[in-house]
Amino acid sequence: MKNILHSALNNFFVHMVGIELEIKDIFEVRECYISKIELKGDINYDAYLFSTVGFLQKMSSIFLFIDDPDEDTLKDLNNEMLNIVIGNAKCIYSEIGTHFAISTPKFIGIGEKLLNLKEISFSSAIYESEEIKISLMERQ
């Protein structure tokens, strides 16, 4: 699972946005924007994207050409990045015979990591000292 999440993150940022991320094994961020998508089918997990405000501001500038994004833009951008990355992961999974539907992304809030959920797999990355993490967690 972790390799698929790494591939999906890399596919989006390298091929669509045009930046290289440094994949890392530790996610150190305390406060971040959190979005969620439900996966239902052969895989029944919730996918979360955790992004620092700095990471979202950099992506807004690169991806949307907006240098000073407002709060709604940052929330929408976090949702859309999660949607694209999980959509890419869904395609990769389907190639190995694993199928699932994905929900519409939902912005959860700004806060710390969801420590009360059991993490199944994750991929973390860093770009110009700002962090991002995509995580599959057990559904409560």
Image (cartoon, grey):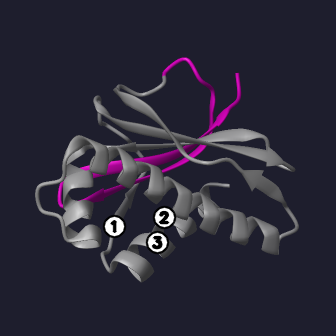
Q: Are marks 2 and 3 in contact (CB under 8 Å)?
A: yes
- For label 2, the residue is 9
Residue 66 location (% of width, % of height)? 17, 64
Membership of 79 in magenta stretch = no
Q: Say what amino acid the circle numbered 2 marks.
A: Leu
Residue 77 location (% of width, % of height)? 36, 54
Q: Residue at x 61, y 48 (%)?
A: 104
Q: Are marks 1 and 2 in contact (CB under 8 Å)?
A: yes
What is the spatial separation of the Cα atoms under label 1 and label 3, in whole angstroms?
Answer: 10 Å
Q: Are marks 1 and 3 in contact (CB under 8 Å)?
A: no
What is the spatial separation of the Cα atoms under label 2 and label 3, in whole angstroms?
Answer: 5 Å
Q: Which mark is residue 21?
A: 1
Residue 111 location (% of width, % of height)? 34, 25
User: Could you say which quadrant of the image residue 29 lies in?
Assistant: top left
Q: Nearer the viewer, mark 1 or mark 3?
A: 3
User: Could you say which quadrant of the image residue 125 lies in?
Assistant: bottom left
Which numbered disc flags the more N-terminal residue, 1 or 3? 3
Helix, strand or loop under label 1: loop
What are the residue bounds of the magenta stretch? Answer: 115-140
Binning the other alpha carbons within 10 Å of mark 2 as few (below 14), some (14 to 19) or many (20 upward) gives: many
